Amino acid sequence: MDLEQEIPTIEKESLPRHVVIIPDGNRRWAVKRGLKHWEGHEAGAENTENLVREAQRLGIREISFWGSSLENLVKRPVIESQALLGIYETYFKKLLESQDIHKDEVHIRFIGHWEEQFPESLKKVMYACLEATKGYSKHYLNFLLAYSGDDDMRSAFQKVAGTLKPGEAVTDTLIKENLMTRELAPVEFLIRTGGEPHLSAGFMMWDIANAQLYFSDKYYPDFDEKAFQEALLDYAARERRLGR
């Protein structure tokens, strides 16, 4: 089957409107090749460029990537964390200068505690990305950085508890409005690479309530456009009952 030809034949309504990717396996990919851990992260960043481009080509409205949890930057060796932050800065500079981002009117968003955790030079680039794309609404590209879902949910309930009036009901809308992910659409399709079929740190627990899940055995740098297309074909073939 020629996936290059197959994907465009999928009806538009059969494609997910919001895809989230948990890009697991960068470090294991590097170790397998005798490389440094951060070289795996570099390969992963290059792959992210390709997947973003492919998502735009296919017409997927919103795509999100989990870059790091709150714990990642603390628990990993300092040299690896510093290298990862450097990779972020290089990648986001490329995004800022990308003609495709502006041609396709891609709105970039960063979600998480990155403003508290990241160095000023990196934040300066990220602020520039936010400012340059804030008026776009054709596509949305989200990066969850220094983000953990359990922390997000806990913080949301603390905010709700502090503002709830006597007798006021806690609604789905109220919860969503107090999440870090409040601007993001509900997730319809979640992909995790790396061969470990599980979720982590309560990742986006509110937003993935009705998401379809897909686990790939490929390490993230090897999860290329063809693998992405295969995942989307799998999604399009599923019957989604949404509780019915």
Image (cartoon, rainbow, N blue to C red):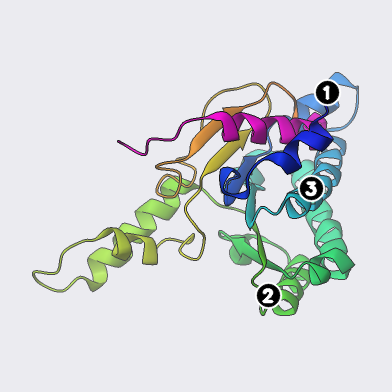
Residue under the point 52% across and 27% down: 198
Query: Is residue 241 a member of the stretch shown in magenta?
Result: yes
**Nearer mark to the viewer, of 1 and 3:** 3
Residue under the point 30% across and 65% down: 174
Q: Please name the residue that numbered disc 3 is placed on.
A: 54
Tag 3's secondary structure? Answer: helix
Q: Residues within 10 Å of mark 2 (few under 14, many from 20)?
A: some
Give the quarter of the figure containing the C terminus: top left
Horizontal side, residue 155 vs residue 163: left or right: right
Q: Please name the residue that numbered disc 1 is placed on.
A: 31
User: In front here: 89 or 231?
Assistant: 231
Q: Amino acid at mark 3?
A: Glu
Sequence-wise first label, 2 or 1: 1
Work out how far the residue at label 1 is from the one at label 3, CA to CA, in angstroms. 27 Å
Tag 2's secondary structure? Answer: loop
Q: Which disc number belongs to residue 218? A: none
Q: Amino acid at mark 2?
A: Tyr
Q: Which residues are magenta?
A: 220-244
Q: Position of residue 147 (x, y in %)?
A: 55, 52
Residue under the point 47% across and 47% down: 204
Which quarter of the figure has residue 136? bottom right
Q: Residues within 10 Å of mark 3 (few under 14, many from 20)?
A: some
